[in-house]
Image (cartoon, grey):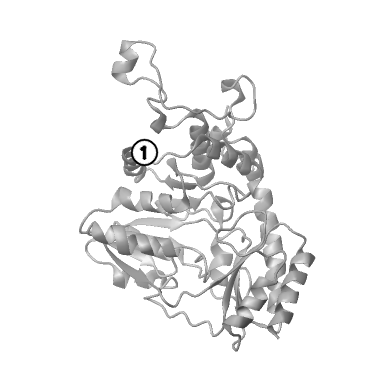
Amino acid sequence: MSVQQQPDLALATQLVHLGSEPSDQYGFVNTPVYRGSTVVYPDYQHLKQRDMPFGYGTDGTPTVKALEDAWTTLSGAAGTVISPSGLGSISLALLSVLKAGDHLLMTDSAYRPTRILCEGMLKRFGVTTTYYDPTIGSDIAALVQPNTRVIFTESPGSQSLEIQDIPAIVAVAKQHNIITMMDNTWATPIFFKAHAHGIDMVIEAGTKYLSGHSDLLMGLVSANAATWPALRETYDAMAMCPGPEDCFLALRGLRTMHLRLKEAEKQGLAMAKWLQARPEVAQVLHPALPDCPGHDLWRRDFLGSSGLFSMILKPGQTEQDLAAFLDGLKLFRMGFSWGGYESLIIPFDCKPYRTATAWQPGGIALRLQIGLEAIEDLQADLAAGFARLS
């Protein structure tokens, strides 16, 4: 009996064994890298009926399928497709159900490239988008239009870290027969069970914690039974195929994802609490902190926290001060993405593109990804940076 058929197993056990079928690969525990485009059929009848597990390279390979199956089980979904990037997966999910004349409700805290997709491609295709306050909860019902097709959530927001009331939003969506989607990259299925909370399609940037080593780009979309056929049909039509080597690396990352995520949680909380005590910091935006907005929702719905959060510096710092702070850092590096082994930091400003909410932090905002370095070394690095501010 495969692990996929034993959902009662502990999470750690599932992550070790999901997507591994040694009996299908000469006893080797890891699914090998299958590269290929052409699939040959044994005879005419098989060709006529397309009676093969994979008809062509765009259908995937055993390497791709191993990751699809593993993620489907981990997510509690009906099926999963994999794309070459997280943004690709967001696009794929939206395009699978939206058509000209439809209306999309998009959280105002969304990953900025998602907004560019809405205001560019989707607008050209005749889809209108309304942005909503991520803390709106059940009041989102007032924004529903007769042609509203999708409510898109991201919890927490990838910069401003708002936690959304997913059960309340899902309840409204079900009343109006609206499809719900969620970018669940921050928590992963380990710390937030999006499908169990009623979300129809769940997007994950595998680039982040699934990979864990900052060496691949990947996105995954898992879907429930109602939305799975449309998702798979769109995926097949677009042939948005992942590389088998990337899927192999992601499967390898899957084996230790829970360990790395727990360490990220520990490191992130330790750093967040340390920053709260710093005189230079006005606020730390980390959902697991009791005084962070949305903490009660996080505590109710989530099983843990990751290593990504933000801080707001006290007013009075100039751009020159910011440059001095950042340029002298030795361990924190400036770069986009997160979820890898290394610590990262970037300044951000949501004000130019927020439309449903006013972003007024009162000081310079910085997003931190806490890596696997010794926490005391990371704190010393930031302490030296704070000294340069004064």
Spot the residue most to the bottom: 316
Location of residue 303 in the rendering, given as x and y in whole percent from the top left corner? 60, 58
Disc 1: which residue: 239
In this image, 176 relative to 228: left or right? Answer: left
Kind of residue sitting beneath label 1: Ala
**Residue depicted at 65% across the width and 38% down the height:** 16
**Residue depicted at 24% across the width and 66% down the height:** 145
Which quadrant of the view contains residue 379? Answer: bottom right
| Closer-to-camera residue (152/331) | 331
Which quadrant of the view contains residue 147? Answer: bottom left
Q: How many labels does the image show?
A: 1
Q: In this view, does 226 lie above or below 94?
A: above
In this image, 260 relative to 164: left or right? Answer: right
Q: Could one spot residue 283 in this view of the protein?
A: no
Quadrant location of the C terminus in the rendered image: bottom right
Q: In this view, does 97 lie above or below 25?
A: below
Q: In this view, does 8 lie above or below 172?
A: above
Location of residue 305 in the rendering, given as x and y in whole percent from the top left corner? 61, 61
| Closer-to-camera residue (389/180) | 389
Q: Could one spot residue 184 in this view of the protein?
A: yes
**Residue depicted at 72% across the width and 66% down the height:** 330
Spot the residue most to the top: 43
Which quadrant of the view contains residue 253? Answer: top right
Location of residue 203 in the rendering, given as x and y in whole percent from the top left corner? 45, 52
In this image, 187 relative to 330: left or right? Answer: left
Location of residue 74 in the rendering, given as x and y in whole percent from the top left corner? 54, 44
| Closer-to-camera residue (171/77) | 77
Secondary structure at badge 1 equals loop
Quadrant location of the N terminus in the rendered image: top right
| Closer-to-camera residue (306/55) | 55
Label 1 neighbour load within 10 Å: few <14, some 14-19, many 20+: some
**Residue depicted at 72% across the width and 67% down the height:** 270
